[in-house]
Structures are given as structure tokens and as C-alpha cells.
Image (spheres, rainbow, N blue to C red):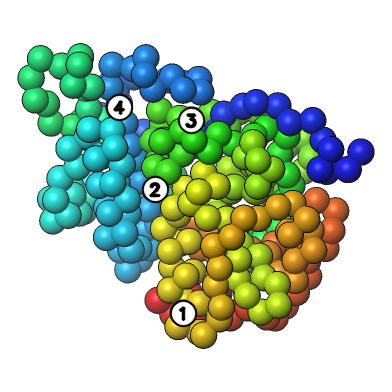
């Protein structure tokens, strides 16, 4: 059976685990079903940031995305100076060895369920960064998931646990021994990974799915665009299909914690150039210099 003809099951997305909840743990955690946001008494948004020995990486662009998510869900995200000060105060009291992942969440009661204007509820957590030097050196294997990614739901564009459930996807990744899985939308376009944005290179041009596909506007997706401009590498937001990645010269993934991760195999098709030379290697080197 070809990949194109595989059966596609309706499903939903995202789930995070392995977090060490250390502050404000009284907030109830639950695993929502698709489109369950309308049944909630509150809305939530979050950001995951990388913390190194030099401090928080690129905090401003994370705040900008959280601010946008707050406007969509009606959550009062404070101005940047107050926001970054909250994060710094948490880090001052956290005995974590850098680098590590910091997650900041803001939750607020929905207006129709609140009698008064309420300030958002803050919570913080941290965890170790799971990526290894060997993965960057050898590249990783990615697969196409059987589930589809809903592309017309507003929460797909922001970081919100109101639209979280990667359980089936994670089981498929484990069963098929893959590093990452890519969702397609109902139109058959590749959207994104369970935790990353995806890019490929063909004829010297970097291509990635557009926002219209339903992908999250990743912070490192934005950085890759900037680096491409700096390095005079053509860049395109375009509809991406499975065949594009299977026939690509190079493929790589991005997120805030991994930075730029080279892909060495798409399903069972090798993509060795992503590791040894070419545009991916140039981007990785330029990214290290930020």
C-alpha cells in the first residue's frame, strides 16, 4: 500500500509529558478531547523556552506569540517587562542545571463564567532537554502519521493545551521506531510534526508549509526565515505534500529546544545530504552564532 493511499483516521493533536511541576500545582490538569475548548471554564496558553548558561533564549518572540494567543482566547498577557521579570524570578529560585526547558503557562476563567475581571493564573515547570549529540550528528528518522491535523480550528495557530492530545501519535512513533511524526491536513498537505515545524530543500530553495496549512508559527521557524535571508538562500512558504519530502535533497526540523535538527530518513528513504553538507549544515552553523 502506498503512503498516499494509507487510511487516514480523524484525530487530534499535542500532548507534553516529563515536566516537573514545581509551582502552582493546584491547577487541575486534564487531557482534552478535540474541540473541547468550548466546554471549559477557563482557557490556557503556554510557551516552552530554552534556558542556557547565558539565560533564556529569544524570550521576546515567545512573549509575542503568547500575547497573540491571549488576544484570541481572552487571556490578559502582561506587558513584556512584567512577563520576563516573572520568568527571571522563577529561575532565581530553581536549582536546574542549564541547558533545560522552561514552560510558562497562563490560565484565565472565560468571561461568561467569571463574575469579575480576574488576573491570569501563572504556573511554571521545567524538564531536561532530551536531544542528543548523536542525533544531530547522524540525523533522525521521520514518518507520516495516519491521523489528520485539523486546519480550520483557531487553536492550531497558538500554543494552548485546550487543543492537546498526541497520545495516538506518540504510540505510533514508538511502534514504528521514529523520532518524529508529521501530520497532514484534510487536503493531504503536510502540516507539521507533533513537536516541530518541518522544512525541505529542493533546487537550492528552502520550503516549509504555510500558515494556511494549519501549522503552528514556531519561533525557530521564524528564525530560519531570517537566517535564509541573511545567507541569501531562497525561501518559500508553499503547500507541501508527502512526495515533496520523499524526493527532497535535504530535510530538517525545528523547535525552541532542538533548534535545527537534520533529518536523515523520511519513512524508508535516506536523506543523507541533510547531515554532511548543504543548506541545512549552513543554517545550523549560522544558528549557533545567534
Q: Which residue is mark 3?
A: 164
Q: Residue at x 84, y 38 (%)?
A: 5
Q: Residue at x 73, y 59 (%)?
A: 245
| Mark 4 and mark 2: Cα distance apart in space | 17 Å
Is label 4 in a helix, a strand or a loop? Answer: strand
Q: Are marks 3 and 4 in contact (CB under 8 Å)?
A: no
Q: Are marks 3 and 2 in contact (CB under 8 Å)?
A: no
Q: Is residue 21 left or right of residue 142?
A: left
Crowd class of label 3 (few under 14; some 14 to 19; many from 20; radius 10 Å): many
Q: Which residue is mark 1?
A: 229
> Of the residues under marks 4 and 2, which one precedes in the sequence?
4
> Of the residues under marks 4 and 1, which one precedes in the sequence?
4
> Of the residues under marks 3 and 2, which one precedes in the sequence?
2
Q: Which residue is mark 4?
A: 43
Tell me where residue 167 sits by quadrant: top right
Q: Which residue is mark 2?
A: 48
Q: Is residue 34 visible?
A: yes
> Of the residues under marks 2 and 1, which one precedes in the sequence?
2
Is label 1 in a helix, a strand or a loop? Answer: helix
> Of the residues under marks 1 and 3, which one precedes in the sequence?
3
Amino acid at each position: 500500500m502506498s503512503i498516499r493511499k494509507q487510511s487516514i483516521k480523524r484525530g487530534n493533536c499535542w500532548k507534553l509529558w516529563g515536566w516537573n511541576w514545581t509551582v502552582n500545582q493546584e491547577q487541575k490538569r486534564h487531557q482534552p478531547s478535540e474541540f473541547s475548548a468550548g466546554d471549559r471554564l477557563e482557557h490556557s496558553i503556554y510557551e516552552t523556552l530554552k534556558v542556557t548558561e547565558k539565560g533564556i533564549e529569544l524570550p521576546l518572540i515567545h512573549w509575542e506569540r503568547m500575547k497573540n494567543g491571549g488576544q484570541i482566547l481572552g487571556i490578559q498577557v502582561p506587558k513584556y517587562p512584567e512577563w520576563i521579570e516573572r520568568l527571571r524570578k522563577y529561575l532565581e529560585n530553581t536549582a536546574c542545571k542549564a541547558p533545560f526547558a522552561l514552560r510558562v503557562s497562563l490560565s484565565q476563567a472565560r468571561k461568561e463564567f467569571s463574575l469579575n475581571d480576574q488576573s491570569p493564573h501563572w504556573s511554571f515547570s521545567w524538564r531536561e532537554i532530551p536531544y542528543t549529540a548523536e542525533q544531530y550528528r547522524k540525523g533522525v528518522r521521520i514518518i507520516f502519521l495516519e491521523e489528520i491535523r485539523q486546519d480550520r480550528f483557531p487553536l492550531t495557530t497558538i500554543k494552548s493545551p485546550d487543543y492537546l492530545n498526541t497520545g495516538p501519535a506518540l504510540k505510533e512513533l514508538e511502534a514504528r521506531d521514529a523520532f518524529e511524526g508529521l501530520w497532514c491536513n484534510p487536503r493531504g498537505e503536510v502540516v507539521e510534526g507533533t513537536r516541530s515545524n518541518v522544512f525541505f530543500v529542493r533546487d537550492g530553495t528552502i520550503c516549509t508549509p504555510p500558515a494556511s496549512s494549519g501549522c503552528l508559527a514556531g519561533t525557530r521557524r521564524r528564525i530560519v526565515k531570517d537566517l535564509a535571508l541573511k545567507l541569501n538562500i531562497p525561501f518559500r512558504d508553499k503547500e507541501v505534500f508527502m512526495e515533496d519530502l520523499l524526493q527532497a535533497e535535504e530535510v530538517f526540523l525545528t523547535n525552541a529546544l532542538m533548534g535545527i535538527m537534520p533529518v536523515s530518513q523520511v519513512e524508508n528513504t535516506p536523506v543523507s545530504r541533510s547531515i554532511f553538507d548543504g543548506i541545512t549544515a549552513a543554517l545550523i552553523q549560522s544558528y549557533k552564532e545567534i
